[in-house]
């Protein structure tokens, strides 16, 4: 694996843990796709730093379990603003 990919994987995992970030937020921050973020954290990072990979995975699992709530809130906000105009 190329050095820059390993460095990116570590940086992505660190960002996710420090900011409690979602895959989407992380992808936007690093200018990569959601698939790349996911692959870096779940596959590549396991080979580089398994402990960091597990910690990042915990954050992503929490975010995944809460995403339906965030989606519902976003929809609610959308229609509250839409109806007030």
Image (cartoon, helix red, strand yellow):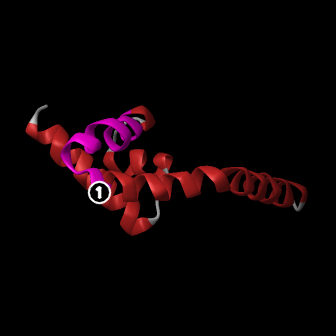
Task: Indicate the quadrant containing the N terminus: top left, top right, bottom left or bottom right.
Answer: top left
Which residue is located at x 35 percent, y 44 percent? 41
Task: Give the percent coordinates (x, y) of residue 79.
Answer: 85, 54
Task: Give the percent coordinates (x, y) of residue 44.
Answer: 27, 37
* Res. 48 image quadrant: top left
| Residue 63 among those drawn in magenta | no
Which residue is located at x 13 percent, y 40 percent? 4
Label 1 neighbourhood size at 10 Å, few (<14), some (14-19), many (20+)?
few
Which residues lie in the magenta part?
A: 36-52
Residue in front for this viewpoint, 84 or 50 = 50
Say what secondary structure mark 1 lies in: helix
Which residue is identified by label 1? 51
Q: What type of secondary structure mainly makes up the magenta span?
A: helix
Q: Residue furthest left?
A: 3
Q: Is residue 35 left or right of residue 67?
A: left
Residue in front for this viewpoint, 14 or 72 = 14
Q: Vertically, is 76 above or below 48?
A: below
Task: Give the percent coordinates (x, y) of residue 65.
Answer: 65, 52
Q: Is residue 50 left or right of residue 64?
A: left
| Residue 46 among those drawn in magenta | yes
Which residue is located at x 46 percent, y 64 percent? 20
């Amino acid at each position: 694996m190329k050095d820059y990919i390993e460095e990116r994987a570590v940086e992505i995992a660190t960002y996710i843990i420090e900011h409690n970030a979602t895959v989407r937020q992380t992808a936007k921050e690093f200018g990569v796709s959601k698939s790349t973020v996911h692959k870096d954290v779940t596959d590549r990072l396991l080979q580089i730093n398994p402990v960091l990979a597990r910690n990042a995975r915990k954050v992503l699992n929490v975010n995944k379990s809460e995403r339906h709530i965030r989606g519902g809130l976003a929809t609610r906000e959308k229609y509250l603003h839409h109806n007030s105009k």
